[in-house]
Amino acid sequence: MTKIFGHRGASGYAPENTLEAFRLAAEMKADGVELDVQLTRDGEIVVIHDEIIDRTSDHQGKVMDYTLEQLCGFNFNNKNENYEFCRIPTLREVLELLEPTELKINVELKTGIFHYPGIEEKVLELVDSLNMNSRIIYSSFNHNTVRKIREMRPDAYCGMLHNDVIINIAGYAKMYGMNALHPNKYFLLDDEYIAQARQFQLDINSWTINTEQEITLALKKGIDVLITNYPDRALAIRKQLTGK
């Protein structure tokens, strides 16, 4: 059965990538959440999508140019009037919040623009310290990052994110020991793409699937993980289609 993950938490309702959004996704009974990680100037792992904080906070600049203490003083409510103040969370805080639940966590390492030396080791060490490796999906648009994680941790579940058409993407991902492909939702319209992924025994974890039409299509295609800003909507449609 297709699993439903909250994209940056239940980000259709609460400010993305905040504890409030992840808590809400858990309350909605999502199967998991997706989040993004980067490093601060002082080497702390924070959960934020953009390399620049302008869009989601009340300040400007690069994540990597601020210390964790500085970032924690900024408001990351993403101009959502229902949330007066939201603090940027660390990955540890999110994992500790979700540890008592059964939710899976898709950790996307944002190394496509800035590499953040050592981020792979830091993330793995943190996950190990909390004994949560079996609940983590590691993904990145920088395929060197997930290849490195696979080399350091052969039992880690790894997926390659992609937004463009790549020749023999399934064979390429399998060659580097990946467990999954993480395609843009538009690839779900391509039955050959899905067949090739299945031929190479790869899961399909797709994003960001929000409308009723998109959710219904993804569920009928039988993908493994459906990543959405509105987990409650997807869960309701899944129940209509499958009774579960």
Image: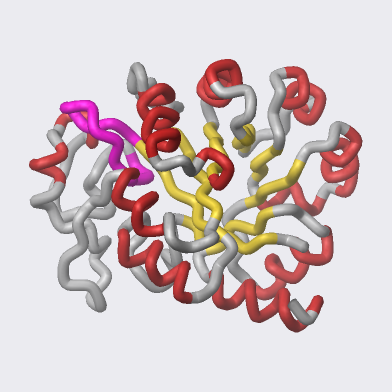
Q: Residue at x 58, y 56 (%)?
A: 208
Report x, y in % for residue 244: 74, 77
Report x, y in % for residue 129: 38, 35
Quadrant position of residue 123: top left
Quadrant position of residue 78: bottom left
96 shown above or below 3:
above
In front here: 122 or 111? Answer: 122
3 shown above or below 51:
below
Q: Residue at x 56, y 26 (%)?
A: 146
Image quarter in which the N terminus is found = bottom right
Q: Residue at x 44, y 29 (%)?
A: 124
Q: Is residue 203 magenta?
A: no
Q: In the rendered view, does 51 fall on the left or right side of 32?
A: left
155 shown above or below 127:
above
Q: Main secondary structure of the magenta part?
A: loop
Quadrant position of residue 235: bottom right
Q: In the rendered view, does 218 fall on the left or right side of 16?
A: right
Report x, y in % for residue 207: 60, 52
95 shown above or below 176:
below
Q: Residue at x 53, y 46 (%)?
A: 106
Q: In the rendered view, does 150 fall on the left or right side of 2?
A: left
In front here: 8 or 107? Answer: 107
Q: What is the basis of the colouring in this image?
A: secondary structure
Q: Which residues are magenta?
A: 38-50
